[in-house]
Image: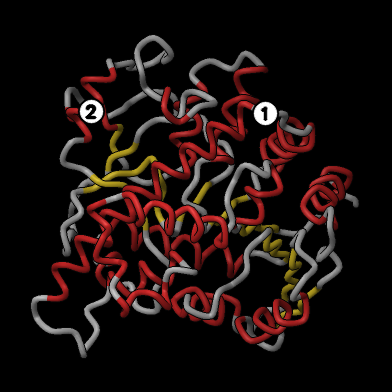
Amino acid sequence: MSRESKKERLLILGSGFSKAVSDKMPVVRELAQALQKQIETDPGLTALKEPQYQHLLNDPEMLLTYLAQDQPWKQPWEAPKEWSLYLKISKWLAEYIRACESRAFEGQIDDWVKQQLPEWLEKTKTSVITFNYDTVLERIYFLYLRKRGVGEPHAIIFNSYRMPLAPIQSRMAGVLSGGKEYMFHLIKLHGSTNWFYSGVGQFPGEQIYCRLVDSEFPYKDDISENSDFWGISPDELEILLSDKVPFIIPPVAEKSRFYANQTIRSLWGKAREYLAQAEEIYCVGYSLPDTDLTVKLLLQTACAGRAKTVYIVNNDVKGKEDLVRRYRDAFPKEVAIKDDYIRADAVEAMIKDLCKEG
């Protein structure tokens, strides 16, 4: 493809992307199984054994959706209890995903992941929208930068968020300053396991904190014996996080509780801008769940009246027809939906094709 014919591109990532990187990363079904085991042994989650929650346990995100929303039929005393359950599950979910990431990066990572993908992103600076809570993409890029001998790779990755997050260590000292080198822009619309906030119901102006990615293993991030930047001891880190919870937004139908925060609103505004500009959109491992009405409205609004091509990239060929239907329903009619990349090696094939084109 010649330089003149290059199109403005955008990547949208779902859990299938992380699963393609490593089979140690969970999809929704595996998260549900893990949560059900946790409920059996965790006294703090005993309430989820009650009958009204049983139909939700096969879909953790739907469960979080239900617990986070103050439904009109709930009694006044139910909402606080269910918000408490929401926070407990969010904390467990973040810990479980971090453990899966650690196992993933202990294993073999394919060359298209650790070399071709980050090299292409660095070269093209293609923006990425992700609905994943994990930090798989950040760690891929960290390893890539470290292999190249780039100084302060954590600062480059931190700057990829391009939002006023504060490193968790700034609770002890000043806010991060330093290098302004940018990689691709990483827009995490559903939060992240390494972002933290108070967990209160309303937080429009609250500072969101970030634990810097500076290792291939989540549990080693920021720890002094590992970090080449602002390292602290495990005990100090525990104190800094003692009154914070992971900032995780489920794909709820109504997200006003979370989106009152101005920092998060700015992220969604940037996502709209990138969606409007993109000529080609690659949706990688993203199932576009029916519950996420906010995303569907975003896609309809940002892409309306513009000719675009959307590529569905999914390694799971089962349910192809329904997946394509959801995409056709979510995007405006003038957007072309392509299903060429719904196949067993979809993610790897897409990366290799994009790298060939440059």
Which residue: 70% across, 58% down?
9
The amino acid type, in three-letter code, at marker 1 is Gly
Which residue: 60% across, 77% down?
303
Side of 284 relative to 88 (left or right):
right
Which residue: 26% across, 60% down?
46
- Label 1: which secondary element: loop
Whole-percent x, y for residue 209 in the image: 28, 40
Whichever of callouts 1 and 2 sits on the residue coming sooner in the sequence is: 1
Whole-percent x, y for residue 287 in the image: 62, 69
Q: Which mark is residue 107?
A: 1
Q: Which mark is residue 238?
A: 2
Q: Give whichever of 345, 116 is nearer the camera.
A: 345
The amino acid type, in three-letter code, at marker 2 is Glu
- Label 2: which secondary element: helix
Estimate the spatial distance between the alpha carbons at disc 1 and disc 2, rounded to whole Å: 28 Å
Q: Height in image: 358 above or below 205?
A: above
Whole-percent x, y for residue 14 in the image: 60, 58
The quarter of the picture where residue 77 lies is bottom left
The quarter of the picture where residue 337 lies is bottom right
